[in-house]
Image (cartoon, rainbow, N blue to C red):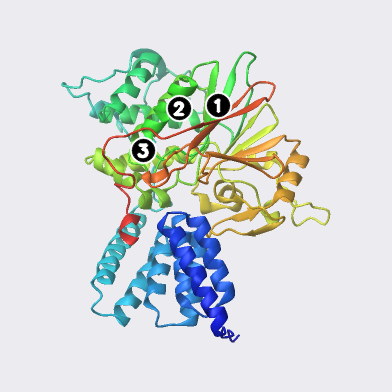
């Protein structure tokens, strides 16, 4: 298709719109800038720079798929436009497509051999890609043994100089380990059931003084000993694994549940939520709706406090998995780097145990049988079990989530992926997601899902909101985001939602609090590709 050339007057108007968009971009008003660049493109679709400028805005709003598409459009217009290859490489890097990003940096070097920036970015991208591929090769699913089954806490005594909170100890009865002795004669009654011999062992556990001390210890930027890290991770993985993929929550009379969105490693803002709204208890329930880690540089502190609270209050503190509770995101956006930095000797093994634990997290919760809470959002028609039936309506039923085997990475199946990655849109129907993953869905999709499943509303997170929350789709689709001043780059507020047993709902906004001088994304790999 031949792109029509704009006349002088139209081209001039397009340039004016571009300058307006540039001003919005300079003020970090990226959504407004996207609108103006879109108007400029509509006026004159022949200028590659309009597309690459809009692509950069999409990167800042996490619309990496849209940024890639804009870079493609610019390359179609001018295959020699080097900035387009840069933009596409950036978008692909943030999407975790390092092999393709590496190819674009190589193309820039071919076209501009003296471009030192391209050489540096290619080298870093290639190094990261090769490391990840090497680790995948030596840790394939076929050969992988569960880390949770291999950690021996006796090999990790507490340091003698440790002055932090201590886990109390208790005794419990466990089956006696079987001693394998090749010289032992075979049991003649091997086919008969034998009484399992039990032995008494001592174990550490979480209580309220420990959790309160832990919150303060982390606030002072101190690390937990390796022994306690492993003890908590092993216990939480054991607690989470038997849970259903969708957990039903009943809010007792006289209680309230608070639903929070993404916190992304912003530990000091988490402490502020507890200060403003109250510390978790048996009557002050909490549900944190995924994306506990990455981007913010205190992700270890956030997730370990949350896991400790879940162990303390298993029926009053709830955690949904987000798209950032996954290996691909963690390798790019900081959590892996943070774990390795804070626990260099055990970093790789500990990170792998975190991944096993993340896979055990529930994907959704249902409050009072009426409020569906999931990190991303709703589903494609073809995702529903009945999609291919002659009378199928293509609506996912809640029982499909209850039955979902979740112990995988998000890309394993569409129901899991869309639960963690989808976003709402204003227009009816469904559309490709600008993120490059899952879908966008409109008010009609939300209404149909709520009607079929007898729901009052859906609460989801996954998107930064200027005021901390947004009520959309005729009140049936609510987004809550709890990371104010997201990534230390915005002025957005955070929010949380309080829900009573009668489903009375109130929304509360809050602003960011100071944190120690460790910048957001300090441990992230994608920083180098901006």
The location of residue 65, given as percent across then percent down, is: 51, 62
Q: Secondary structure at mark 1?
A: strand
Q: Nearer the viewer, residue 528 or 339?
A: 528
Residue with the mark numbered 1? 258
Marks 2/1: CA–CA distance: 10 Å
Residue 480 located left or right of residue 163: right
Q: Secondary structure at mark 3?
A: helix
The location of residue 76, given as percent across then percent down, is: 50, 80
Residue with the mark numbered 3? 299
Q: Nearer the viewer, residue 493 or 302?
A: 493
Quadrant, the N terminus:
bottom right
Determine which of the numbered discs, if any, sits on residue 243 in the image.
Answer: none
x 38%, y 45%: residue:
487
Residue neighbourhood size for the residue with mark 3, other residues' Cα within 10 Å, grouped as few (<14), some (14–19), many (≥20): many
Residue 245 located left or right of residue 464: right
x 32%, y 75%: residue:
106
The location of residue 243, given as percent across then percent down, is: 55, 31
Q: Are marks 2 and 1 in contact (CB under 8 Å)?
A: yes
Marks 3/2: CA–CA distance: 16 Å
Residue 344 located left or right of residue 530: left
- Write down the quadrant of residue 265 in the picture: top left
Residue with the mark numbered 2? 273
Marks 1/3: CA–CA distance: 21 Å
Q: Residue furthest right?
A: 391
The location of residue 362, given as percent across then percent down, is: 54, 36
Q: Earlier in the sequence, mark 2 or mark 1?
A: 1
Q: Are marks 3 and 2 in contact (CB under 8 Å)?
A: no
Observer able to see residue 71: no
């Amino acid at each position: 298709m031949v792109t029509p050339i704009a006349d002088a007057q139209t081209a001039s108007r397009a340039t004016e719109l571009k300058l307006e968009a540039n001003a919005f971009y300079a003020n970090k008003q990226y959504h407004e800038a996207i609108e103006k660049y879109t108007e400029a493109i509509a006026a004159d679709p022949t200028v590659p720079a309009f597309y690459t400028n809009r692509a950069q805005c999409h990167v800042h709003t996490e619309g990496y798929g849209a940024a890639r598409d804009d870079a493609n459009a610019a390359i179609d217009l001018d295959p020699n436009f080097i900035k387009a290859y840069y933009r596409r490489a950036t978008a692909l890097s943030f999407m975790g497509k390092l092999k393709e990003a590496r190819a674009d940096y190589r193309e820039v070097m071919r076209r501009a051999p003296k471009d030192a920036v391209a050489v540096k970015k290619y080298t870093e991208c290639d190094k990261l890609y090769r490391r990840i591929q090497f680790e995948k090769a030596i840790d394939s699913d076929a050969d992988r043994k569960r880390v949770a089954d291999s950690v021996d806490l006796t090999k990790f005594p507490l340091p003698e100089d440790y002055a932090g909170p201590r886990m109390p100890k208790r005794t419990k009865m466990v089956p006696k380990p079987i001693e394998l002795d090749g010289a032992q004669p075979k049991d003649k009654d091997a086919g008969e059931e034998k009484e399992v011999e039990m032995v008494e062992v001592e174990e550490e556990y979480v209580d309220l003084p420990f959790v309160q001390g832990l919150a303060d210890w982390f606030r002072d930027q101190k690390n937990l000993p390796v022994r306690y890290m492993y003890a908590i991770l092993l216990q939480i993985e054991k607690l989470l694994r038997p849970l259903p993929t969708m957990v039903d929550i009943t809010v007792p009379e006289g209680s309230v549940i608070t639903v929070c969105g993404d916190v992304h490693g912003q530990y000091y803002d988490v402490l502020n939520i507890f200060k403003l709204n109250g510390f978790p208890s048996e009557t002050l329930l909490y549900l944190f709706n995924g994306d506990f880690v990455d981007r913010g540089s205190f992700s270890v502190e956030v997730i370990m406090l949350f896991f400790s609270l879940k162990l303390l209050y298993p029926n009053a503190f709830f955690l949904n998995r987000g798209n950032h509770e996954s290996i691909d995101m963690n390798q790019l956006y900081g959590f892996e780097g943070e774990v390795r930095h804070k626990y260099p000797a055990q970093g790789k093994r500990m990170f792998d145990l975190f991944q096993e634990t993340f896979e055990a997290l529930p994907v959704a919760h249902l409050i009072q049988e009426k409020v569906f809470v999931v990190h991303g959002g709703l589903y494609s028609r073809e995702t529903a079990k009945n999609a291919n039936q002659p009378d199928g309506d293509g609506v996912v039923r809640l029982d499909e989530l209850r039955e979902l085997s979740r112990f995988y990475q998000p890309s394993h199946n569409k129901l899991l992926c869309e639960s963690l990655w989808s976003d709402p849109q204003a227009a009816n129907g469904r559309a490709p997601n600008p993120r490059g993953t899952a879908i966008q869905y409109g008010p009609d999709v939300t209404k149909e899902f709520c009607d079929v499943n007898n729901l009052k509303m859906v609460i989801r997170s996954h998107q930064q909101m200027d005021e901390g929350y947004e009520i959309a789709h005729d009140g049936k689709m609510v987004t809550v985001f709890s990371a104010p001043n997201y990534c230390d780059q915005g002025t957005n507020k955070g929010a949380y939602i309080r829900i009573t047993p009668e489903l009375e709902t109130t929304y509360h906004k809050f602003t960011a609090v100071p944190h120690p001088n460790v910048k957001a994304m300090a441990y992230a790999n994608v920083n180098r590709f901006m």
